[in-house]
Every structure is written in C-alpha cells, then in structure tokens.
Image (cartoon, grey):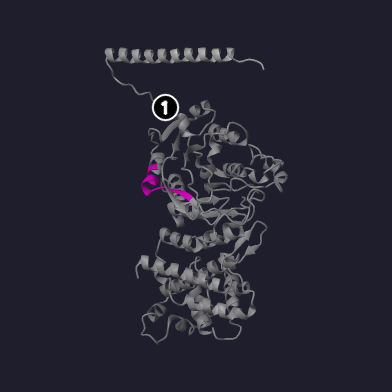
Amino acid sequence: MNDIDFKEKTKALIDSLKSISANYGLGNDGNEFKIITQVFLYKFMNDKFAFELKKLDPKLRNAENLPKGQASWEEVVKTYSEDEYEMLLLQLGADTAKLKPQHFISTLFSRQNESDFAKLFDDTLMDIAISNNDIFSVKTDGGAKVILFDRLTEYISDGSKRDAFAKAIINKLVGVSFEHIFHQKFDFYATIFEYLIKDYNTNSGGKYAEYFTPHAVAKIMAAILVNEPDQDVTVYDPSAGSGTLLMNIAHAIGEDKCTIYSQDVSQKSSSLLRLNLILNNLVHSIQNIIQGNTILHPYHKDQEGNLEKFDYIVSNPPFKLDFSDYRDDLDSKENNERFFAGIPNVPKKAKDKMAIYSLFLQHIIHSLSKKGKAAIVVPTGFITAQSGIDKKIRQKIVESKMLAGVVSMPSNIFATTGTNVSIVFLDKTNQSEVVLIDASKLGETVKEGKNQKTVLTSTEEQQIIDTFNQRKAVDDFSVVVSYDEIKQKNYSLSAGQYFEVKIEYVDITAEEFIAKMQGFEDKLNQLFDEGRALEMEIQNNLKGLGYE
C-alpha cells in the first residue's frame, strides 16, 4: 500500500468513527471530538507499540509472516513470562506507550461479546492512561494531571446502548494497521492531524477562539525563524492551540534537536496538542504542555522562580478578548517588567474588544533568551498605531534593536476572521537592518464554507521567505531599513510608508512641450469663461428674487 492509499484509508477510518458517533446521537455533540481523537490515539499507540516490539524481538516480527490461522504476534507475546515481558518493555523508547496484552485491540476484539463490554473498553483505556501517566499526561497550571483517556462510553446517555457502541468502535479498529507508516515524516502526519480535527478546531462556542493557523502562515514563520541549522534549543508558544505553529518550527529545527514548551487556557487545545506531539515524534515534550491562563498564571519558570527564557517563540494569540474579570490582578509590581508598555483599561462598552494580543506580545518579548527569536501574528493595525500601548511596544523593540522585520499578509488569510494580519519577527541578535514586506496583494481568493479566504501559492510563499531571508528590497513589495529610519517614521512598521514615490519622465521635443502648454492654457481659459458666465447667471437669478 502506498502513502496516498494509506492516507485515504486513514481518512476513511476517521470518517467511520464520526459516523458511529452520529449513529449513537453524538454527531456535533460537545464530546464527539474526545471520542474521535482518543479512539484514534488508542489505535495509533497500539500499532506503534507493535511496530517497536517487533523491531526488538525477531520471534514477534516473524509471526506476522506465518500462514493465516497460525499464531499471531499477539499470541506469541502472551506466552512470555512476566519477567521476559518486562525486559522487553524496558527496551522500548520513552516515546512508546507501555501496553499489556489485555490492552491490545485484538484482545478487546476477541472479548466483545462479554457482558458489560463497554465497561471493559473504558477500563482498558483508563488502565493504559494510568500506566503511562508520567509520560503522556498534560499538566494544568495548578499542578493537576490530565490523563490520556476518558471513560468514552459514558458519553452515551442511554446505558443500554453503550456495549453496542464500544463493539462498533472496536470492529472499526481492526481493519487497518498503522505499522507500515511510522517511518513517515511531518508532512504526512500534518495532513492526517488536520483531517482528524477539522470539525473540532473552529472559532465557535467559546470566548477563547481556537483558530487554526493556516499552513502558509505557519510555514513562512518557521522558514524565516529557522534559516540555519540549530540544535538543543527550546521552543515556546504561550497560546499554542492545537500546535500548528509549534509542529512547523519543530520540523524546521528537527524534532530531535528541540524541546517544546506551551501553555493554553483551552482544555480541548491542550488535548489536541498532546495528540499532535505524539504523531510527530515529540513525546518527550508532552510534560511541558500546560493547560492554563498564560497571562494570569504563566507556568514555565526557572529554579529562581523567574519566567523561563526561550530560544524560539511562535504565537498566534487571540486578538480581542474580555479579560476584565482579572485585569486588575495583572496590575501588580511583579508584572511591571513583563507588561512594560501597560495593561489595556476596561472600556465602558464592548469589553470583548479588549486588546489582549498586546499582553501576549509583551509576555513574549519578556520571555526571549539573550539570542532569542520570535514570530507573532498581530492585527495589522498594530504596526502603525500612533499612540498607546501598541506604539510603546514598537518603540521598545526598535530602541532595544530586537526587530528582524514584518510581513503584512493579504486580507482574509484566515477564513474565520476578516481582520488583516501581519507577522512580527523578533531577533535579539539583529543589530542592523530591518526587512518590511507588503504581501497584501498576493494570493488567490477561494471560498471556504460561507467565508472568502485568500490562499497563497507555493511560489508566493517562497517569494516571501526568500525576500525576507535574503534581505532584498523589491519595488512596491519590500524595503530594508535601519532602526534610525524607523524612528524617523514615528516607529511605523508598514512597508508602504517607506516605498519611494516614483515620478515618470517622458522625453518630448520643445515644439511638443509648447503645444502641450498651449493646450493647458486654452483649457484653462475655457474653464474661466464658463465660470464667469455661471457667475453672471447666478447674480441675475438673485436679482429676480422678490418678497411676497
């Protein structure tokens, strides 16, 4: 089976799991995404375990080549003594969940006709979660651990249907194996992950909107930030969502050359990010996923209790959000350095328009290491605001010489919001020139659902990346300016304000010049004559007015 065929079979499996959920009344239910993503994860972990175990033990590897009807690898495993099996598990890498024979999908498949099968199904998932809690659990900012699985059948309100629901799930999982695709790289799993969560990562139903960052934006951010090899670095996203930005930059650096750190207030996003890390060979970073409010309770700190500093930071933070309920808690001495430009006041109306992105920006600047780099999606209005917190932030990054550049993106690059966005690139080692790009005229308009969306072609993506990394000035597209020039422009970061105004000259003879000037004079005289006639007409009309 080739990669394309397997990708399609995987999508078909995801669709069938969604169909089962719909058949049992969970279509579009708030818990549907938990069932789909956790069942998929259970399948993935089962097959990853089998794949790794067979690499360690030739007997298990050879069992899969036996004629049909003879012992399977699962049956061979069951013949091992407890000590033999434990020794096998000890040889597994930390990125593979440790399973017992009773955890296998094949075991549940063989026991599906037992009474209370739904309880057996749930107990199995819970036992896997508890057994692997140290590696695979997500922490909250309060220190609690969020384990891998929930008791999924309990989302079926009618208890009499839970056994049938669990059976339907298990019967779908035995049809396809992931064992032959674990050598695949980022792009393969990114496609699968996006398809898996496409119905569950929208901006509906909640004040913390979990926007899915377009791959073009994520690719551009990663390619500009990581333009030379690096290793043993830390990567952070304080508003991680499901991890699109983190996965792209980790792939650009090398999954084995970086450690991921994140925080996000959304429980759903943290669970999806965990799944993304598992799919992309970043299990070692799961312990650094924190579910909590970054602005109010930043979690990652050093041994002295100071906020951790990171080598790379990426973020697509929420732009506007009502944080009035904890706004005053931020206005404290311990936050003075972090929120150096200030904290937005609570407006009398439209509290949901509070510019929370300005807090994320300040938090990111404060969290950069001495050689740190960052890429942050901001509303384009930020780059030209003439006063207030936005301008103070721009002054800081210019006067501290930590600005690498800005890319202003096309309108509607996000299908879920009409806000124009720009990407601000920071680099604490950039002491010289700054690249400003106006990419607003690029892209093709397509319809996505009810919304219009602008999509960049791969050529346009590369044009932006190459122009930035090569620091090229291109007419009406990009400029390369000094920090002093930016100060002279009132700290504006809009490329358009630095473009040269061009005057086109046309060569003409003296006779042609005289003729043109005579034409202009004749036209002016004509206009003056018409004006005088109109003036006389108005005066005559005024004289004709009388009082009755």
Residue 179 lies, in percent from the top left, at 42, 71
Taking the spot 55% from the left edge, 44% from the top edge, the residue there is 368
- Amino acid tagged 1: Glu
User: Where, quadrant-wise, is the C terminus in this rendering?
Assistant: top right
Q: Between 444 and 32, which is closer to the camera in this rendering?
A: 444
**Residue to which mark 1 is pinned:** 500
In the image, residue 39 above or below residue 374: below
Residue 6 lies, in percent from the top left, at 39, 68
In the image, residue 295 above or below residue 473: below
- Left or right of residue 395: residue 44: left
Residue 185 lies, in percent from the top left, at 41, 60
Q: Between 361 and 206, which is closer to the camera in this rendering?
A: 206
Residue at the front extreme of this rendering: 548
Magenta-drawn segment: 452-463
Q: Residue 458 lies in magenta, yes or no?
A: yes
Q: Residue 91 lies in magenta, yes or no?
A: no
